[in-house]
Image: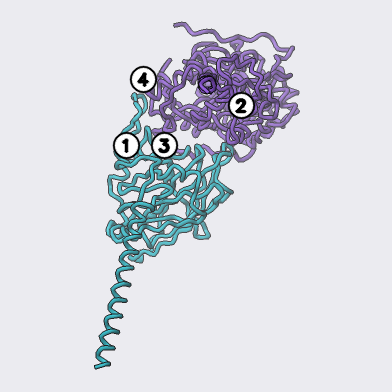
Chain colours: A cyan, B purple
Amino acid sequence: MRNKRFLMVTHSFLSILLILTFTTRRNDAAAHDDAHKTGGACRGFVVLSNGYAVLSDDSASSAHAPEHASQAAPRKGKAEMHKMGSEMPPKHESMMHKGHDHGGEMSKPSVNRKHLLGYRHGQEITLQNEMLCVPIGSKEAISWTTVSHTPALYIRAESLSDTLAHNSRANESLALTVMHRAQDASQEQPRIRLLVRMPHHDRHMPGGHGLANDPDVKGLKAQLDKDGRYRMQTLDFSMAGAWLLEVQVRQGGSIHRAYFAVDVDEE
Amino acid sequence: MMKGCFTAAFLMLLSLTTPDANAQGVRNVDESKQSVSTSMLWTAEEWAKARRFSPLPPLPASPTNALAENQQAARLGHQLFFDPRLSPNGVACASCHQPERGFTDGLSVANTLSPVHRNSMTILNVGYYRWLTWDGSRDSLWHQAIGPIESSKEMGSSRLYVVRTVMRHYAQGLKRLTTLPNGWDQLWPTLPEFGKPGDPAFDNLPQKHQESVNRVLVTILKAIAAYERKLVSAAAPFDRFVAGDRSALSVAAQRGFQHFLRLQCDTCHTTPLFSDDEFHNLGLPPVPEPDQGRAEGLPRLQRSQFRGSGPYADGAPVVRAEDYRFGKALVGSFRTPSLREVSSTAPYGHNGSLATLEAWLDHYVRVTSSPQDFVGSLDPALFPVTITAQEKRELLSFLHSLSSDYSSEWTLKPATIGAYKSGRKSSP
């Protein structure tokens, strides 16, 4: 009888303990979710589901994420992001080239911000599904790690000179180390293309303007070097400020994208 | 007690109606006579930015021109710059780049033999740029000089005419700078008097002779470039103020600098040159004709045999034209001019369509809110601005403080040189 009572008490105690533990974990997840919704604003560029980027939090250009920052995607949306796959919607590229006029035609400034999906540059943006937060490296940074929707893709970028500056007498150059554990085990050497832009300078050009040597953001091809790294030899940043760099890795018929952001200083 | 209350109330009323002389500076006072310390006007951040604008640093190297720092080359170039004999029409470089006019000509568009479609840029501080001319179709000073020389509208000359003229009058000076091609002394008197690529007189020459002509021409151009590098600003009032002379800048000019930063003019007018040496479309009207700007200039540069990465460069260029690609964003874009010496270089804009600095400021306000007809797309860095009349006055004060007394031995016309033709206003 006594043993029965003991067992019942122990059973009840353990049950209560289990219930409490389960409840706490659920609260933690909920709290975590809440943090992403309310307190988890991205300080950097937010890449939207349509491929365009918004500068989140004006102070992101002056108060930066630590060097080598690699912001993970929020837990809540990760499964949904994986479902998206690695291909961006086809409309992405065509949208990026709109807003330019042919020579000789008249043009008026565009204030159409539909590509920002209701967001505006400078506002605090809490990540939602299919968004990616790209923190802006500090002015002193000389290396960066990308963020991507593709978890198997890891790219490290390094400046081949010094800290990045808008310099009228020299151009910048980067080395990219690409690690992509493709599930299809394709042996094809990846082809790398770099698209560099200032997304928040999109008043007359959706997506923002590009480098001085790639003004329409068509992308610059990286050259594979003997050491296995890819080199971007000429990056002419036309002004100081925050720039978003998109690394496109083309392999086996697929395009995978990874991003990092830099803060270019004045010379 | 009542008396005390009334007194207190009166004093309170008095304090409320008396202007606070310390708030936002002294009002209704002639600022040119203001004796209050002006060093307090700028914040620490503004001072930090000011120090990035001043002083002008030493000239950067010119790796494609081995004669860039050669004094003898500069002296020869000095002569050549003012010499009208380089053109059969009596036009010299100085015809459009007049020292007394900030090395411009004071015209909307250059017009010596016939009007061109662009404003004459100043030669002052030109050694600091990597892209030359409004459309960046030249990537070195020596490369730039060939354009006006062989333009039928500007000097109406040719490389054959120039090399023969220089050999007639400056052979010794040239020989001190370089070893001339083998057999040149025997060759040049036999060359046709006039001719450039596209003319049968030049095209029919043996390839070897064409190459020799080009080699001698390039030496001449590099000597002119060595001279042009001597034309730099002296310390302007803005520079003296930043260096510590607190009386050098009026309160109005100091406020003007603050407006300059607030309006983000330093996005493009940056570095001590007050130019980012980049290309922007500011929506100027398509007069006297629609102008593609950099969109045409870049391909022209890339095709030129005298580009910095070409066979006539003495060293690797700072930037390679081949590394740049055409983009629609370049249409109608032009190189940012320096704001130094801007007081002397009116009218303004690539087409000289803005007669005064006031007109320029008005244009910025107008084009960002209600742009008129222009070529291409407006620069993405531009945003709507409003400038009050007071702010405009102060901005102008600041801009004028960037001009210096740039005169030196190098700005004087050599005594041995005869008169040259000057530009004239275009017919309406």
State yes or no: discs 4 and 3 in contact (Cβ < 8 Å): no
- Above or below, B113 relative to B49: above
Viewer-side label of 2, 3: 3
Find numbered disc 1 in the image and state the secondary structure of the residue it sits on: loop
Is A236 on the left or on the right of B86, as rendered? left
Q: Amino acid at mark 1?
A: Arg
Q: Position of residue B119 (x, y in %)?
A: 51, 17
Mark 1 Cα shell of 10 Å, populated few (<14), some (14-19), many (≥20): some
* Labels 4, 2: front one: 4
Dot 2 lies on which element?
A: helix
> Viewer-nearest of labels 4 and 3?
3
- Helix, strand or loop status at disc 4: loop
Callout 4 and callout 3 share a chain: no
Q: Which residue is mark 3?
A: A201
Q: Quadrant of the C terminus of chain A?
A: top right
Q: Which residue is mark 4?
A: B373
Mark 3 or mark 1: name the one nearer the start of the chain.
Answer: 1
Q: Which mark is residue A113?
A: 1
Circle 3: element type: loop
Disc count in the image?
A: 4
Disc 4 with disc 2 on a shared chain: yes
Q: Are marks 2 and 3 in contact (CB under 8 Å)?
A: no
Q: Residue at x 70, y 29 (%)?
A: B244
Disc 1 from disc 4: Cα separation: 23 Å
Kind of residue at disc 2: Val
Give x and y (percent) for residue A202: 38, 36
Q: Position of residue B115 (x, y in %)?
A: 49, 12
Closer mark to the observer between disc 1 and disc 4? 1
Which quadrant of the figure has residue B142? top right
Q: Which residue is mark 2?
A: B126
